[in-house]
Image (spheres, helix red, strand yellow):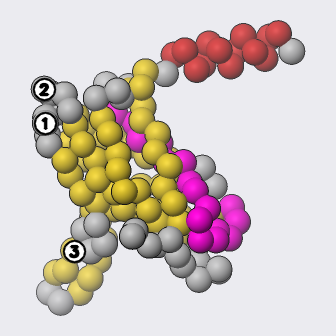
Amino acid sequence: MKRVIAVCLTVYSSLTFAADMSFSNAYIPLMPPASMAYAAYMSISNASEQPRKVVGVSAEGFAMADIHKSMIKDGVVSMELVHELNVPAGETITLVPGGIHVMLMKPDAAFMKGDTVTIQFMFADGEVAKVEATLGRLN
């Protein structure tokens, strides 16, 4: 048991949290129970004097999570994988329907209104930020 605690403390202490980043209004619209894909939306603010770059995302309860950008080309709606999401210094970006969003795929179970999902953002410098997104519409 002591060995497990020591390993957990070592892993936890190796994470650096992105204190200069803040997340607000994080929500995931409700989907039909059999849905294999959800999307998360929110505002991401960078209070630092340096631009920040999100290079990865994961979400508890989902097999896969990516950042996508919706677009219309020649009248056809499609999505494109976003490999790096830049958050300029001192600015806020907003993930919205029809634009940039976190795509959540292959849920482990059905979600209900009011459930929360922890989404973890990984930054290029190794820092990590976690945000709780609530299932349901933003009020």
Image coords of residue 110 (percent x, y):
68, 70
Image coords of residue 125 (percent x, y):
31, 25
| 122 and 91: which is toward the camera | 91
Residue at mark 1 to residue at mark 3: CA–CA distance: 26 Å
Residue 71, numbered label: 3
* Disc 1 element: loop
Image coords of residue 104 (percent x, y):
49, 62
| Mark 3 surroundings: few (<14), some (14-19) or many (≥20) residues within 10 A | some
Do the residues under discs 2 and 3 have CB atoms within 8 angstroms? no
Is residue 56 in sight in this rendering?
yes
Residue at the spot 15% in from the left edge and 27% down from the top edge: 50
Residue at mark 2 to residue at mark 1: CA–CA distance: 6 Å
Q: Amino acid at mark 2?
A: Glu
Magenta-highlighted residues: 108-124
**Up-down: is 19 above or below 59?**
above
* Disc 3 element: strand
Task: Indicate the quadrant containing the N terminus: top left, top right, bottom left or bottom right.
Answer: top right
Image coords of residue 120 (percent x, y):
47, 42
Q: Earlier in the sequence, mark 2 or mark 1?
A: 2
Query: In the image, is residue 90 part of the stretch drawn in magenta?
Result: no
**Residue indicated by mark 2:** 49
Do the residues under discs 2 and 1 have CB atoms within 8 angstroms? yes
